[in-house]
Amino acid sequence: MKEFRDFVYEFNLTQPQLQLQINSLQTEFSLFSTAFDVHMLSIGQSFQRNDERIDRIDTILSILTRQTSIILEENREFRQRADRFDTDNSLHERKIDNLTERVEVLEKAHI
């Protein structure tokens, strides 16, 4: 593998020419480095905004999950109450039917 000095000798660069090349490369690298830093800062800010959005979405999903759980529990309780009401209602109807039959039997016996 060639070293830097081998390239310098190969191109027959003089010391001032070499210094100009080095300065040119340093300037280009400095410009690149500055642009790179600006872009990385922009990307970092974008990630931060996205992270904040995700946090808000997580909060909203948490609230929605809690609300959904509450609604499901209320629906379950409502169905249980409605089922008890239907059961109680059918029991009352049977009692009324039995009492109606008894009344009819007693009325026939008295007539």
Image (tube, rainbow, N blue to C red):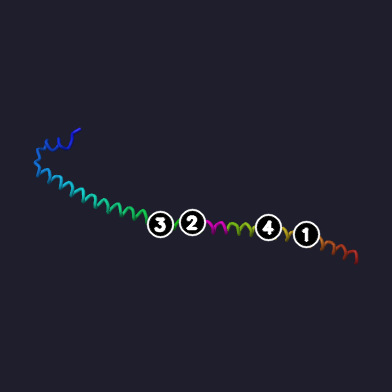
Q: How far apart are marks 4 and 3 (CA)?
A: 46 Å
Q: Which stretch did the figure color magenta?
A: 64-70
Amino acid carrying mark 3 in the image: Glu
Q: Name which of mark 1 and mark 3 comes first in the sequence.
A: 3
**Residue furthest out toward the right:** 110
Q: Mark 1 points at which residue?
A: 94
Give the secondary structure at mark 2.
helix
Q: In this view, does 73 lie to the left or right of 104?
A: left
Q: Nearer the viewer, mark 1 or mark 3?
A: 3
The percent coordinates of residue 16 (x first, y second) are 9, 44
Viewer-closest of 22 and 74: 22
Using the image, tell me which numbered label, if any, was put on residue 83: 4
| Residue plotted at (90% across, 64% down) | 109
Q: Mark 3 points at which residue?
A: 52
Graded by Cα atoms within 10 Å as few (under 14), some (14 to 19) or many (20 or more), the crowding at tag 4 reads few
Graded by Cα atoms within 10 Å as few (under 14), some (14 to 19) or many (20 or more), the crowding at tag 1 reads few
Q: Distance between the residues labelled 4 and 1?
A: 17 Å
Quadrant for the N terminus, please.
top left
Using the image, tell me which numbered label, if any, was put on residue 61: 2
Using the image, tell me which numbered label, if any, was put on residue 75: none
Q: Name which of mark 1 and mark 2 comes first in the sequence.
A: 2
Give the secondary structure at mark 1.
helix
| Residue plotted at (33% across, 53% down) | 44
Amino acid carrying mark 2 in the image: Leu
Q: Name which of mark 4 and mark 2 comes first in the sequence.
A: 2
Q: Are marks 2 and 3 in contact (CB under 8 Å)?
A: no
Viewer-closest of 43 and 65: 43
